[in-house]
Image (cartoon, helix red, strand yellow):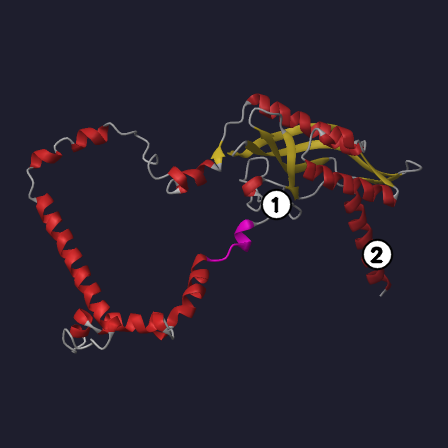
Amino acid sequence: MLFAFLAIVATFALVAIQADAAPRSNAGSRGSRTFSAPAPTATAPKAASPINRTMTQPGAATAARPGAAAAGAAAPAAGGLFNRPGLLGGLAAGFLGAGLFGMLAGNGLAGGLGGIASFLGLLLQIGIVAGVALLAWRWWQSRSQPATATAGGPALRQGLPSNSNSAMSFGGFGGGSAAQAAADVPIEVKPEDFDAFEKLLGEVLTGYGAEDLNALRTRVTPEMLSYYSEELTHNTSNGDVNQISDVKLLQGDLSEAWREGNDEYATVAMRYSLNDRLVERTTGKLIEQLPSEVTELWTFRRNVGGNWILSATQQAS
């Protein structure tokens, strides 16, 4: 019993230390890929831990199935137009009770003429039949014209713009697949970008270790800054300091990079070494020497042509 109690106490102590030893977390935003696993790399060949703290909303999870809404809307119409009381229902029944529909039902051409509605229904049906016959006659006439009348058609089509979406995308119709593809476009990451990632790795970690929110403010997104600020406040409340120094990138490679509108994202797997210590705030006494080598996936974001900043962190499995 005593050993079980000591084991529970040790477990809670370890959890408390790990909570103070941030910023190793799975937090932030990766745009539309926030809830998707980054692609594996040589540095991080296994799946990364999922992001469990984010301000991004999973839109797909809250969207209703289109078929369900359509079925729900269609259900009340089972009675239809003819089951409605009053003038509208009587007119509808009269329109179909006379004329051609009445003849198909076995009542004869005038079998349903029991009132003004039936008479109007007969006139309406005759008009519909005459209109269909007129359209058919005009179509037959156009088919009978000489072939020279349409000889210039192909040449006219060749003069149209080559963009097949130009006619249908106006006003939001058509072009949907192109717009969706444009929302997630792969981009090229250049050597100077990797230099910026390595520099940010050191600056963010040392800024966190120095509890310098002003330094972090220009290097991380507002979302990540709020998480770091909360963690530093927690450390202060516990009387601890997570001192970080001597950060050095050992290995890194690109997982994926893409553009969404005016924002560009790059997720990079990085294995790095550091001097990571948890000490008492007042005395500087060492509480724990934390692991000196870490592998994480960091996602950076920037406006097109702007500077990269940290947008999310994930632990490698």
Q: Toward which corner of the image does residue 176 lie, by quadrant?
A: top left
Q: Quadrant of the C terminus?
A: top right
Q: Which mark is residue 13?
A: none
Q: Amino acid at mark 1?
A: Thr
Frontmost residue, 76 versus 307 = 76
Q: Amino acid at mark 2?
A: Val
- The x and y percentages for residue 25 are 69, 43
Q: Is residue 253 left or right of residue 224?
A: left
Q: Toward which corner of the image does residue 208 lie, by quadrant?
A: top right
SS label for mark 1:
loop
Q: Which residues are magenta?
A: 59-65
- The x and y percentages for residue 7 are 81, 57
Q: What residue is disc 2 on?
A: 9
Q: Residue at x 78, y 42 (%)?
A: 231
Frontmost residue, 317 versus 97 = 97
SS label for mark 2:
helix
Q: Which mark is residue 56?
A: 1
Frontmost residue, 8 versus 171 = 171
Q: Is residue 242 above or below residue 140?
A: above
Q: Earlier in the sequence, mark 1 or mark 2?
A: 2
Q: How far apart, in angstroms, are the residues tagged by discs 1 and 2?
A: 36 Å
**Quick one: label 1, few (<14), some, or many (20+) residues within 10 Å?**
some
